Image (spheres, rainbow, N blue to C red):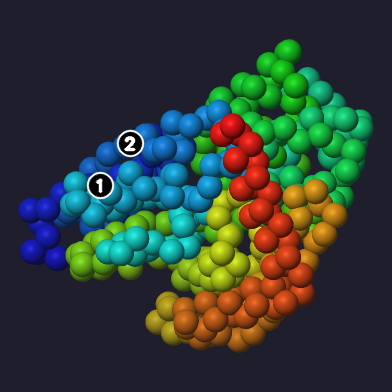
Amino acid sequence: MASQSARTFVLASRASNLAQIQTNIVRDDLEAAFPSLSFSTSFMTTEGDKNQSQALYLLGGKALWTKELEVALRENVVDMLVHCLKDVPTTLPDGCEIGAILERENPVDSLVVKQGLPYKTLEEFPAGSVVGTSSVRRVAQLRKSFPGLVFLDVRGNLNTRLAKLDAPDGPYTALILAKAGLVRLGMGDRVTADLAAPILYYAVSQGALAVEIRTDDQEARELCKMLTHQETQWKCLAERALLRELEGGCSVPVGVSTSLSQIDKSDGHLTRATLTITGCVTSIDGSVHVQDTLSQEVGSTQEVEELGRMLATTLMSNGAKAILDDITQDRRKRATDAAE
């Protein structure tokens, strides 16, 4: 590592409070592991941050959150990008790759009830209660089980969304939020209840942080090896392969639940395990739900990704393709209507 001593590695991310906290987590881990090296941070506002008025369903793919950052990375302005992996497109631009996937926080979604209200579960909500979320995945799955609830889009960082929730004249009874973000922000006490499968399958890679690097940056790649948590990596790579095969963006209602068992390691490295992955695709109105589970012994990232692709193929043949085609047509129609 002596050749790297004069280099300062610049870690970049979005400018939100959560993104900065997450970037500092990665920087601190790198500084602890490589005390002789220098690391700094840089934060910027992305298109997804700037557009707070349109529903994510109409805005399109995940590149809204990453494009500006990736331009800076490819132009050598910064060296590493820190992302919530669930926000990263499953296909990266030429010259970019995922260098590290860190140990995952609990990936479940959580119910956060408005301050002062007595409800502890969704089952207790009166018919017509308004639940805030910008995720069509959450809306689709919850409509299936709770058809009496009303779902309303809510945008902004976590502090902004919680302020909208707690406003005395606000419309929301509760929000659905990723537990990992609340925990990282020190707001875990706001969680009323976790919404785990089978009520709500979480988003692909939810709860995991990733570091994106240039493919020609061997020094950064070597540093990232220390950050990677293999169990998380294998689970998330399977989930991302599933989503890539389904051609789903951040506004497609694809849910997952993934686990590893019978884990074998050699010299601290994961060598074999049984990977079990459940995937589901749900129509926007919750009326059609396609779900399946595959379980297989795997021994490499290639085998992990192949299992994800196999599950996608199974889901598509069992009805997921029709759901996704309908969603694509609906989005195009609504986007056209909004533009008129």
- Which of the pair 46/12 is nearer the observer? 46
In the image: residue 84, left or right of residue 136: left
* Label 2 environment density (alpha carbons within 10 Å; few <14, some 14–19, many ≥20): few
Q: Quarter of the image holding residue 340?
A: top right
Residue 47 visible, this orientation: yes
Instruction: Name the residue located 80 percent from the left edge and 61 percent from the top edge.
Output: 289
- Which of the pair 3/163 is nearer the observer? 163
Instruction: Name the residue located 76 percent from the left edge and 36 percent from the top edge.
Output: 151
Q: Where residue 314 sits: x, y (%)?
A: 70, 78
Q: Is residue 257 above or below residue 74?
A: below
Q: Quarter of the image holding residue 150?
A: top right
Q: Which label number is shown at residue 113?
A: none
**What is the C-alpha distance between the residues marked 1 and 2?**
10 Å
Q: Is residue 157 above or below residue 108?
A: above
Q: Is residue 69 above or below residue 275?
A: above
Q: Secondary structure at mark 1?
A: helix
What residue type is disc 2 on?
A: Met
Q: Which residue carries the number 1 mark?
A: 72
* Label 1 environment density (alpha carbons within 10 Å; few <14, some 14–19, many ≥20): some
Q: Which residue carries the number 2 mark?
A: 44
Q: Where residue 35 sits: x, y (%)?
A: 21, 53
Circles 1, 2 touching at the beta carbon (< 8 Å): yes
Across the whole image, how many numbered discs are drawn on residues?
2
Q: Residue furthest front?
A: 340
Instruction: Name the residue located 41 percent from the left edge and 37 percent from the top edge.
Output: 47
Q: Secondary structure at mark 2?
A: strand
